[in-house]
Amino acid sequence: MSQPIRLKDHEKDSRLVRGRVVVGAFVVVGLICVLLARLYYLQVVQYEYHSTLSENNRVHVQPIPPTRGLIFDRNGVVIADNRPSFSLSMTRERSGDWQQVLDVIVEVLQLTPEDRALFEKRMKQGRRPFEPVPILFELNEEQIARIAVNQFRLPGVEVVAQLVRHYPQGAHFAHSVGYMGRINEKELKTLDPVNYSGTHHIGKTGIERFYEAELHGQVGYEEVETNARGRVLRVLKRTDPIPGKDIVLSLDIKLQEAAEEALAGRRGAVVALNPMTGEVLAMVSQPSFDPNLFVTGISFKAYAELRDSIDRPLFNRILRGLYPPGSTIKPAVAIAGLDSGVISATSRVYDPGYYQLPNYDHKYRNWNRTGDGYVDLDTAIMRSNDTYFYDLAHKLGIDRLSTYMNQFGIGRKVSLDMFEESAGLMPSREWKRATRRQAWFPGETLILGIGQGYMQSTPLQLAQATALIASKGKWIRPHLAKTIEGVPPVDPDPVPDIVLRDPSNWAKVNHGMQQVVHGARGTARVAGVGAQYLIAGKSGTAQVVAIKQGEKYDRSKVQERHRDHALFVGFAPANNPQITVSVMIENGEAGSRVASPVVRKVMDAWLLGEDGKLKPEYGGPVKAEAPANDQ
């Protein structure tokens, strides 16, 4: 028997549906309330915050680095300019896994693991957020094409066109103009982060560093609207940068080349000044190097070759090379003796070939072992007589000698705009007591009188000391900048002139220096042969290693790099000084024979015209005395 069919309970179903609808309605209303509350919180309570955040995501301020000022020689020849170059930059915040992106770059451009390590080092250097970091410079066309094809794999990476420093004259001015390089972390801490935003290079040495503030200029900026991927849609506002100032140097490229040619590849330095203005006309330190290697980053191998070279091409011999001045200091010592009154121009000293202190057996040898007999001031300078200057130094004493030499720039920095300059050393009683904890001995004063002993000077200091004799004590600091944006540089701390009790003493020493070159027994008379103008000069030979008492110098027994340095200083025309030249040739041995011809060639290059005759503004030709046959 079949079961009866149960009728549907519509009332019960209705109650169930109504209950579910009510619950569902409450849930929906609750969710709507939550949504409205959240919208109220975001759009009302946090309106200021989110509106600012949204605007920052849409509008960005991008720095516009200024164009760096150019550097010219005195004739308008470009020494340092800016040229366009393509670099690869990367923004870490937009690259996601930037380490992986670097791997892709190395793969795409077929670079080495060393390049990969360098890229990572650059990415980790201090920087501002969202600031692109250049990781590879001077891209070629093939590399640019490879990056473009693989752009989808390189988020945050872009090829950027920018101006980079270029030195068209190469190694000619490496030690004077210097070079630029990437900003390191130490420099980043001292620089103005606003003015250097977008700038990745800074002057490292020379003029590039000393005048960094003038050459750099002022950064500009632009407000740009970007999309979610950071692509610029439009420029909203722009403030143009202020370009750096152009600098005209006093250097002359033709004179620079003439000085380099005169050195003939030997290790040494040549400095040429205008004694009346302080302008540096030529500044050569050999061997030199190509500064372009440092601009975008020198390779480890190339830097190691320069750094480890026995000839030290990176070493600025003009400003940092410390050498005993030798006999080149004797004219300044003569001025000290005349001005202090311990000698006169007619004072004579007998030279048997050596000098002895009273009650001492030690003999201080003259370079001429046979002696020059009775010697006055003129002869002492002409013959570079050591005995005369031993006696003069003894009469002066260390205190007066040190004071006068300081006035001539020995033992102090003399330049206006060469920050790398060494102060050298002019010893004194106080110096020796402080550094050696010893008393000063009379014999030490004697050897200072001939430019040996503790005394050390740079080629620039010797040039300045000679310029002071040429200008009769007028102190003008040597400087490289002739004008900065058309304005001459100003010395903020001028040095007092050297004022002698009897100004005629300048002429007396000048005449003695003329006899060195033009006198019949002058030590450097070879340099005066055929000269169309008068030259006042002084040779010097500085010992590198000491020689025992009574022993004679024998070059065959001395290693090449232990041989004496050859020096010569001079100015011309002697009666109307227009150029002062200081030459130092490392291990050249004889200043009168090796260094003086270099000085003559530099002077000829400056004073003679293209026709080989003396320029009219420097006076008429002068017939120099023919050298005698005596040695």
Image: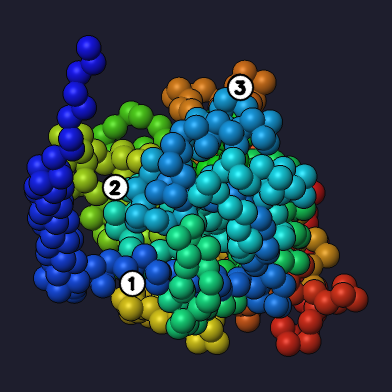
Residue 65 visible (yes or no) = no
Residue reaching furthest to the top: 1
For the residues carrying marks 2 and 1, which lies nearer the camera in this image? 1
Q: Secondary structure at mark 2?
A: loop
Q: Secondary structure at mark 1?
A: helix
Residue matched to label 2? 427
Residue matched to label 1? 55
Residue 144 visible (yes or no) = yes
Alpha-carbon distance for marks 3 and 2?
29 Å
Hey, which quadrant is residue 362 in on the image? Answer: top left
Identify which amino acid the numbered label 3 is placed on: Gln
x and y percentages locating residue 279 in the rendered image = 55, 74
Residue at point 46%, 33% (across, down)? 99
Residue reaching furthest to the right: 611
Identify which amino acid the numbered label 1 is placed on: Glu
Identify which amino acid the numbered label 2 is placed on: Pro
Residue at point 61%, 64% (across, down)? 163
Residue matched to label 3? 559
| Residue 230, above or below 499 | above
Residue at point 67%, 35% (across, down)? 108
Quick one: quadrant of the C terminus? top right
